[in-house]
Image (tube, rainbow, N blue to C red):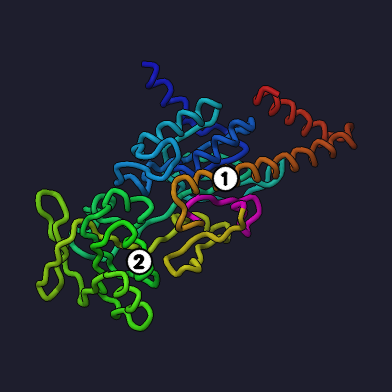
Amino acid sequence: MVAVEVIVVTDRLGDGCDVVVVGGGAAGLSGALLLARARRSVVVINAGAPRNAPATGVHGLLALDGTPPTELLERGRAEVRGYGGRVVTGEVAGVAREDGTDGTGFAVTLADGRTVRARRLLVATGLVDELPEIPGLRDRWGRDVLHCPYCHGWEVRDRAIGVLATGPLAVHGALLFRQWSADVTFFTHTMPPPTGEQAEQLAARGIGVMDGEVAALEIIEDRLAGVRLTDGTVVTREALAVPPRMVARAGFLAALGLAPAEHPSGLGEHIPADATGRTEVPEVWVAGNVTDLAAQVGTAAAAGATAAAQINADLVAEDTRQAVAAYRDPLSAESEARVGELVIGNRRHGL
């Protein structure tokens, strides 16, 4: 009975808040946690489709290595709620700029019609992995079809690893995976075979090169057994590294004039931002994979906290400007109304 009541309460958006965090992954929850601890009213909109859901565990995260992604996020949501933050299930359909009595803000609308107003936005929606159209590939994603050696390299160490050429850093990826296994094969797939220095590097490291397009994966007893080319050749492999094209999940930001841009690496699209997560659109910050394609869970969480600290500082500056204006003109009706709002707001936050 208690659990049902908690879900009902935390799924309410309320009238407004200081910050709406769009995205309930490591970056979003980390940012929300810091903001809630800073006594800010914060609402996290969680679509419930984390990119790392297929993985059995999160790796390289100090003291939490191997923790299942779902468990990590459950802990994070509980921590945010423990400080008064709200985490609601939903998908953001649109964001619009609007003016309020306490300055500019945003109206965030969910796909189900719910709306919440926020003074600031932190977008941590992550990205989508676009994979080659090879039969069987998507079904193995996050299991024995991988993309990051630092996330999965240890788990496939000393096994027969294949690396599928999909972009400009394909050879670099093969050289990385060679660190975890001496048995690495590079599949050119639809790209030209490596030449010159790259071909020499692969040869020097004992990485075999298979020309020809990959047609399908060979699966035996729910395990990857090999890679089949269009000419019928089957190369025995136990793991296949497939660098995807990564695209930011942030279409709803277009209404604010914020569109994805090609990442300098050539590996996909991201929302550009400075080192603190501040975008070119005032009062909008981003954190995690939506802006940093290479960010692992720990990096994303740190970026969320960094952005949140900047957001809180920005709000403190705004609150101070408004308080000074009210202090200088205490008889103004507008100032009196604002002071009343500040008092109510402070009481709401226990100040």
Is residue 192 positioned above or below 339 on the image? Answer: below
Left or right position of 350 against 107: right
Q: Residue at x 42, y 60 (%)?
A: 247
Pick the front one: 7 or 111: 7
Q: Position of residue 347 (x, y in %)?
A: 69, 23
Q: Is residue 9 magenta?
A: no
Pick the front one: 25 or 208: 208
Magenta range = 276-291
According to the picture, the residue beneath numbered tag 1 turns out to be: 107
According to the picture, the residue beneath numbered tag 2 turns out to be: 175
Q: Residue at x 49, y 39 (%)?
A: 29
Which amino acid type corresponds to the residue marked 1 in the rendered image? Ala
Q: Residues within 10 Å of mark 1 (few under 14, many from 20)?
A: some
Of pointers 1 and 2, the one earlier in the residue sequence: 1
Q: Quadrant of residue 186?
A: bottom left
Q: Position of residue 112 (x, y in %)?
A: 42, 42
At numbered mark 1, what does the secondary structure look like: helix, strand or loop? strand
Which amino acid type corresponds to the residue marked 2 in the rendered image? Leu
Q: Residue at x 23, y 57 (%)?
A: 239
Q: Quadrant of residue 174?
A: bottom left
Are the residues flagged by discs 1 and 2 in contact, CB closer than 8 Å?
no
Is residue 94 positioned above or below 263 on the image? Answer: above
At numbered mark 2, what does the secondary structure look like: helix, strand or loop? helix
